[in-house]
Amino acid sequence: QVQLVESGGGVVQPGRSLRLSCVASGFIFSSYGMHWVRQAPGKGLEWVAVISYDGSNKYYADSVKGRFTISRDNSKNTLYLQMDTLRAEDTAVYYCAKKYSNYVDWIDYWGQGTLVTVSS
Amino acid sequence: QSVLTQSPSASGAPGQRVTISCTGSSSNIGAGYDVHWYQQLPGTAPKLLIYGNSNRPSGVPDRFSGSKSGTSASLAITGLQAEDEADYYCQSYDSSLSGYVFGTGTKVTVL
């Protein structure tokens, strides 16, 4: 069965960096695009970034463009989110999520999420 | 700030019908991009409920149905059950933003 397991969350000071990881299993990771989606405490879902199956195409929400970088290592079945110059408003649960296919834009599987808290 | 607007809450007694709307614009739903719906039970990750405007994944009860018209979409829950109490989000693509967008979310309460 499909499993997505995020890690790397924690408490970090404003202006610092953090890297999230998501290990995938149960499907051919190298064949699917992947998203990062976040949810601030008590708030709704916010799309963060998406990467194509081979890593050649990446797109970001305006709120994180220039600060966050999505990447993947298909040899390790792992998705990453490098978060730099963190702000208090980046505090959220970050979900790794799998695209149903490379030609449609819905998400069919989600990880359990990892909490990032940006605070001094 | 989300570009897809949903009513913050909806409620109904067990067995009743509840409808949730998702209003977008000419750069997302109105541009022809599909709408998808997710259910998020308290303390859990979201789960795909409806894809491609009106299709149910395997395992989703037929009490859930979706539709799309113009710049809006709707999710209907018929025969409301206690386990349907959750937050519901619509999702689409926005060409102006060149990115994916979620609705503001609707909390469904079973009275």
Image (cartoon, coloured by chain):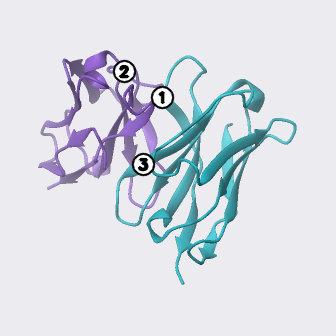
Chain colours: A cyan, B purple
Q: Disc 2 sits on a residue from what chain?
A: B
- Per the image, the residue denoted by label 2 is B34
- Residue B2 placement: quadrant: top left
Q: Identity of the amino acid at label 1? A: Trp
Q: Is residue B70 above or below residue A40?
A: above
Expressed as whole percent of the image width and height from the top left, the position of residue B35 reads: 34, 26
Q: Quadrant of the N terminus of chain A?
A: top right
Q: Are marks 2 and 3 in contact (CB under 8 Å)?
A: no
Query: In the image, B32: left or right of B16?
Result: right
Q: Is residue B82 above or below residue B103?
A: below
Alpha-carbon neighbours of circle 3 within 10 Å: few (<14), some, or many (≥20)?
A: many
- Per the image, the residue denoted by label 3 is A46
Expressed as whole percent of the image width and height from the top left, the position of residue B103 reads: 30, 41
- Per the image, the residue denoted by label 1 is A106
Query: In the image, A78: left or right of A44?
Result: right
Taking the spot 58% from the left edge, 49% from the top edge, the residue there is: A66
- Tell me how far mark 1 sits from mark 3, CA to CA: 14 Å
Taking the spot 39% from the left edge, 20% from the top edge, the residue there is: B52
